[in-house]
Every structure is written in structure tokens, then in C-alpha cells.
């Protein structure tokens, strides 16, 4: 390889690694008032979240003093690897600042992680389902009665796992709904929630299935306090050896208070 090629390859790699992937959604609120140091503190907070989240998958932190202080929370889905977590939080930190350039309260959702900051500390430990992002598969199931019964039972089961001490707010599982069909589901609460609030967050998400995902083959509910998803294909780790990437057609709905 001649040196020009090497340089071009190097540049291509740089461009590739500098790209960060699009989130499933974001929410920006409360314009920062002029002259405050809030934005500086946010820029100090984000690298700390990026640094500290991957080792345990969850972190809360704060930066600054007095009126300009900001509080952050970052969490990865409990089933993803440290590497996936790290790269997700990096993307989240980068994208949230470009999508919410002047806001003191911001949230960003990915499949593998969630990141949030605010100049109000009270969101930590508090259940919040006020902003919802829903994704549903456009295809409907063939036998809704059986499907919904099995879905309800699976959701009950994994919700119990999510609230159990030591599970870090994660519940996941599958159920065979016919000889050819397996239903996979996962719930993840943020780890600052109490078991009761976690159970409630999941219950609210599941309660909204009929409103946004009725009889659909797949559904994702993204709240600030929990992530709830089901699909008719495996989507969580560890993945089996037979899995292929599924390109399903989904529609997104955003609900803001
Ligand atoms: C958050 O920031 C906004 C805008 O700068 C300000 O009006 C509000 O009082 C701040 N809230 C707290 C709790 O500091
Ligand atoms: C993979 O597919 C084969 C044949 O379709 C099946 O027999 C086997 O049980 C599958 N393995 C897993 C882990 O799903």
C-alpha cells in the first residue's frame, strides 16, 4: 500500500469512528438562562457519565454549584456488553448535546442505553412516564387472542424478574406461542427506581400496548424510567447462534406532556 492510500484509509477510518449513531428519540426542555454556567457544567458532566457508566452499567453524577448545578443519569440495558455500553453512552453524550444545545433538561434514548440530565435533582429516584416514545411493527399477529394472553403472561413473568433484588432492573425471557413462533420480551427499569416504581413503570408501558401496539408483532415503549420491548424474533443478549438480522418495518409515535 502506498502512503497516499494509507492516508486515505486513515481518513476514512477517522470519519467512520467519529460518526455516532442516531438515537431512537430525544427530548429537550427548559432553555438555559443567559449567563448561567449550566452549559459548562453539562459539558463537564457528560465525560464523567461516559467514563463511569460502562463498568457497572449505571451511574448518577452531578457537576457545579448552586443554581448552575446539573445532575445526570446514564444507564445501559443490563444484557449488553461493556463495549456496547461504552459505545452507546459515547453516542448518547455526543448526540444529546447537538440535539439539545441550549437546554438544561435533556433525555436521549437508544436500544442499548439511556442518558438524561437536568438542573433539577429530583428526577433521580422518581418514576417518570410523562414522555413516551413508542415504536410498533406495522404487521399484526394472526391470532390476537392467543398472542395477547401469552404476551401478558410473559410480561408478568419478566416484570417479576426486573423488580427482584440483584437483577439491576432487568427482566427478559421468551415463550413458545406456536410450533413456529417464539415471543421474546425484555424490560429494563432505571436502577434508581424502587421495586414498586419499577413494577409500576412496566405496568404503565404494558397498559399502553393496546393504545399504541394493539395486536402488533413488535412493540417498544421508551420512558425515562423504563424500557419495554417485545418482538417475534430474538433481540437481546445472549443471542442464539441462529439469529439473523431482522429488518422489520416500524412506526414511531412520540407522546409529550
Ligand atoms: C433550571 O434552569 C432554568 C433556566 O436557566 C431556571 O429557570 C430554573 O430555575 C433552574 N432550576 C433549578 C432547580 O435550578
Ligand atoms: C438452530 O437451527 C437449527 C435448525 O433450524 C435447530 O435445530 C437448532 O435448535 C437451532 N439452534 C438454536 C440455538 O436455536
Image: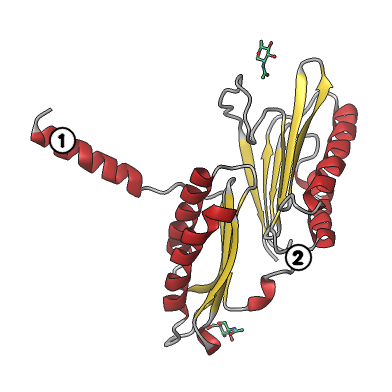
Q: Position of residue 243 (x, y in %)?
A: 60, 23
Name which residue lies at 81% across and 42% down. Answer: 158
Which residue is pictured at 59% across the width and 54% down the height? Answer: 57
Sequence-first tag of 1 and 2 = 1
* Quadrant in the rendering for residue 248: top right
Mark 1 or 2: the one toward you: 1
Q: Give how far across and how far down residue 110 sits, in percent.
A: 57, 49
* Mark 1, residue position: 6
The C terminus: image quadrant: bottom right
Specify the quadrant that holds the N terminus: top left
Quarter of the figure with residue 215:
top right
Q: Which residue is mark 2?
A: 127
Instruction: Answer with left or right where residue 226 lies relative to residue 91.
Output: right
Secondary structure of residue under mark 2: loop
**Horizontal relation, residue 146 to residue 248: left or right:** right
Of residues 27 and 88, which is closer to you in this image? 88
In the picture, measured across the screen, residue 59 lies left or right of residue 159, that is left
Q: CA distance from mark 1 to mark 2?
A: 52 Å
Instruction: Using the image, determine if residue 34 lies above or below residue 60.
Output: below
Q: x and y percent of residue 152 in the render?
A: 87, 39
- Relative horizontal placement of residue 30, taking residue 41 as reference (left or right): right
- Residue 82 visible in the shown view: yes
* Label 2 environment density (alpha carbons within 10 Å; few <14, some 14–19, many ≥20): many
Callout 1 environment at 10 Å: few (<14), some (14 to 19), or many (20+)?
A: few
Of residue 231 and residue 139, the one placed in the foreground of this image is 231
Amino acid at each position: 500500500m502506498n502512503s497516499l492510500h494509507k492516508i486515505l484509509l486513515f481518513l476514512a477510518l477517522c470519519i467512520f469512528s467519529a460518526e455516532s449513531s442516531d438515537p431512537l428519540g430525544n427530548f429537550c426542555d427548559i432553555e438555559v438562562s443567559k449567563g448561567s454556567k449550566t452549559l459548562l457544567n453539562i459539558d463537564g458532566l457528560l465525560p464523567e457519565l461516559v467514563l463511569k457508566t460502562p463498568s457497572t452499567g449505571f451511574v448518577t453524577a452531578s457537576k457545579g454549584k448552586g443554581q448552575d448545578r446539573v445532575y445526570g443519569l446514564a444507564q445501559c440495558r443490563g444484557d449488553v456488553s461493556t463495549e456496547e455500553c461504552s459505545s452507546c453512552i459515547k453516542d448518547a453524550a455526543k448526540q444529546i448535546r447537538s440535539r439539545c444545545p441550549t437546554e438544561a433538561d435533556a433525555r436521549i434514548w437508544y436500544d442499548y442505553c439511556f442518558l438524561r440530565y437536568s438542573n433539577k435533582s429530583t428526577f433521580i429516584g422518581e418514576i417518570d412516564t410523562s414522555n413516551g416514545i413508542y415504536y410498533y411493527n406495522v404487521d399484526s399477529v394472526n391470532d390476537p387472542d392467543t398472542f395477547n394472553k401469552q404476551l401478558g403472561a410473559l410480561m408478568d413473568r419478566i416484570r417479576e424478574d426486573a423488580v427482584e433484588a440483584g437483577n439491576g432492573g432487568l427482566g427478559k425471557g421468551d415463550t413458545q406461542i406456536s410450533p413456529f413462533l417464539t415471543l421474546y420480551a425484555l424490560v429494563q427499569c432505571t436502577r434508581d427506581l424502587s421495586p414498586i416504581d419499577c413494577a409500576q413503570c412496566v405496568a404503565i408501558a404494558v397498559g399502553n400496548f393496546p393504545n399504541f401496539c394493539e395486536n402488533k408483532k413488535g412493540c417498544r415503549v421508551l420512558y425515562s424510567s423504563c424500557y419495554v420491548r417485545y418482538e417475534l424474533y430474538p433481540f437481546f443478549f445472549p443471542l442464539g447462534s441462529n439469529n439473523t438480522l431482522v429488518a422489520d418495518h416500524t412506526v414511531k409515535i412520540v407522546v409529550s406532556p
